[in-house]
Image (cartoon, grey):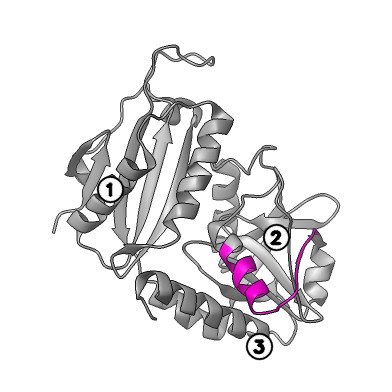
Amino acid sequence: MPQLAYVDGRILPLREASVPVEDRGLQFADALYEVTAVMNGRLLDWDGHLARLRRGLAALAIDFPMSDAALGIAARNLVRRNGHRDALLYMQLSRGVARRDHVFPGAARASLVMTVRRFDFAQRVRQQRTGIAVITRPDDRWGRVEIKTTGLLPNVLAKQAAKAAGAFEAWLVTPDGVVREGGSTNAWIVAGGRLITHPLSPHILGGIARATLIRLAREAQIVVEERAFTLQEALAADEALLTSTTAPLLPVVTIDGRPVGSGTPGPMAARLAALVADEMERQTGWRG
């Protein structure tokens, strides 16, 4: 089955899909994006992704007249026509096409593109048994990373550094040692039975998987602290983990080559992974 893309209301083969050279997303990263998990053919946490997209549109003053219902229909139709049961839905929404100028164009119309690609979520379940490694990098991103824009070059460089080091992720750290988040994930530690993650602020992206894990943990009577933690705290923690749409929950067993806790996935990560698996099954029927 050929891969299909959505471009401003049209569905066409991915190899034929394109955007104009003067699209502001291409020239200025004047665009937002969302990545949604498709499990068992169903969208996971769709309402959360949609709400975050709307917040980003308001923050950037992008007028996107398509209703939530219509966007949901278009997204699900593209997923269905691509035929993948387990996949990632990518949505990118730019301010539109206009003559290159820094100021907002007066007449541009927002442009929406979507793609779907197969994704093996079962591999993440296998990684939960072994854990993953992270390295640290300086956080040199812009000051409004809570807006999910396509301006991701610092994240790209951090992720590439992680790959070169044989690690799964790079945690971004401030000059005074605070761990903010990963290149494409939220960061967590476990200390004294408490689950700790950086609070919502302009300095981190409010992950949808992050919000889900906080809710599930509190429902399970696990104490959650939303506060900044340092790299030294992380190295001394009982456990560490990360969350994202593409890695719903993975235990972190080493940071910069140094073991976290026992250096193996811990009991809190296992308990939380089970809660996340139950939630994914509840929403989509998927079970790894």
Q: Quadrant of residue 251?
A: bottom right
Q: Nearer the viewer, mark 2 or mark 3?
A: 3
Write down the region rendered in magenta.
Answer: 212-228
Q: Nearer the viewer, mark 1 or mark 3?
A: 1
Location of residue 256 in the rendering, given as x and y in whole percent from the top left corner: 71, 68
Q: Is residue 214 above or below residue 25?
A: below
For the residues labelled 1 and 3, the Cα–Cα distance comes to: 40 Å
Nearer-N-terminus badge (1/3): 1
Question: Is 81 left, or right, of 75 in this rendering?
Answer: left
For the residues labelled 2 and 3, the Cα–Cα distance comes to: 24 Å
Q: Of all residues shown, which one is farthest toward the left?
A: 1
Q: Secondary structure at mark 2?
A: strand
For label 2, the residue is 136
Q: Name the residue: 56% across, 56% down.
A: 184
For label 3, the residue is 267
Q: Name the residue: 63% across, 84% down.
A: 265
Location of residue 99 in the rendering, given as x and y in whole percent from the top left corner: 40, 13
Q: Is residue 130 above or below residue 144?
A: below
Q: Amino acid at mark 2?
A: Thr
| Numbered badge on residue 73 | 1
Do the residues under discs 2 and 1 have CB atoms within 8 angstroms?
no
